[in-house]
Amino acid sequence: MNAQDIENMIEINSTNNDFIIDIDIESCVVSEEKLMSSGKKHICSGVPLQICEKLCAGLFICGFITPFVGFDLYFAFTDESCIHQTFDKIHVNMFIYLIVSGLAGIVYAESMSFVDFVYDFEKKYTEEYTNIVLKFCTICQVLFNIFSVSWTMIGCIIFWGYMDNLHCSRTLYNYLFAKFVVACSITSIVLLSKNTIKGK
């Protein structure tokens, strides 16, 4: 579409001096065929949009969780500096914390990916079936959030309250310090955002 075509689409109502823009929207839509023929490609080229969106969501979830899962399990099975310290008042040490944290991350990532790819919320299921699935997902999400916050608090208490973390290797100490700071920051942001939304 050139400037002359657009100019021809503009009608001027000389009676009331108002400009009336009468543009054919369909003529402004670039079809996927034209986009492909022009040689320009987008991220979802050749892939159905819905599948591409689900793939991106799954990759985002896995990409955010996977590093923590990997490092948790790596340090749990390789570190010998301080994670096996035991305590009199609490029966959970850093080794158990890291193992459970890593496995919980795997379960969460797999569950979210399964729901994201298998269940199609836009498909017209029966209302009763959809409500059951949504309630189940909501309950699971709430339970995981409660577990995640509680387990993070336990990890912080172990790391800063019970462990003699001066005996930890430098790499492990820096990782655990960063992990707990990030976890506490995310939890605080989520709680504050929910309170702000409720306040409105």
Image (cartoon, rainbow, N blue to C red):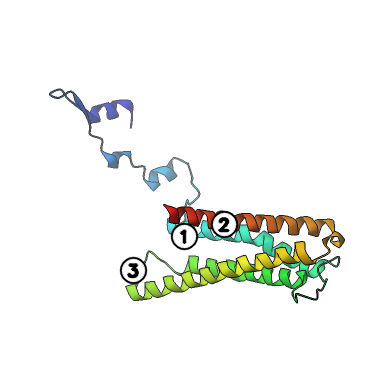
Q: Secondary structure at mark 2?
A: helix
Tell me which residue sits at (79%, 70%) in the image. Answer: 77
Asked if 132 appears above or below 60 in the picture, the reply is below
Give the mark nearest the N terminus, 2 or 3: 2
Mark nearer the viewer, 1 or 3: 3
**Residue underneath mark 3:** 124
Q: Secondary structure at mark 3?
A: loop
Give the mark nearest the N terminus, 1 or 3: 1
Q: Is residue 132 left or right of residue 105?
A: left
Taking depth in this image into account, of 41 and 77 the one nearest to the observer is 77
Tell me which residue sits at (44%, 40%) in the image. Answer: 38
Q: CA separation, marks 2 and 3?
A: 27 Å
Taking depth in this image into account, of 104 and 117 the one nearest to the observer is 104
2 and 3 marks in contact (CB < 8 Å): no
Q: In the image, what residue type sits under mark 2?
A: Phe
The picture places residue 152, in percent across and down from the top left corner, at 66, 65
User: Would residue 125 be visible to someone looking at this image?
Assistant: yes
Q: CA separation, marks 1 and 2?
A: 14 Å
The picture places residue 128, in percent across and down from the top left corner, at 34, 75
User: Would residue 110 be visible to someone looking at this image?
Assistant: no
State which quadrant residue 188 falls in: bottom right
State which quadrant residue 98 falls in: bottom right
Q: In the image, what residue type sits under mark 1?
A: Ile
Tell me which residue sits at (59%, 58%) in the image. Answer: 187
Q: Which mark is residue 51?
A: 1
Q: Which mark is residue 60?
A: 2
The picture places residue 13, in percent across and down from the top left corner, at 16, 26
Q: CA separation, marks 1 and 3?
A: 17 Å
Assess disc 1: are there few (<14), some (14-19) or many (≥20) residues with their C-alpha within 10 Å of its C-alpha.
Answer: few
Mark nearer the viewer, 1 or 2: 2
The picture places residue 32, in percent across and down from the top left corner, at 39, 47
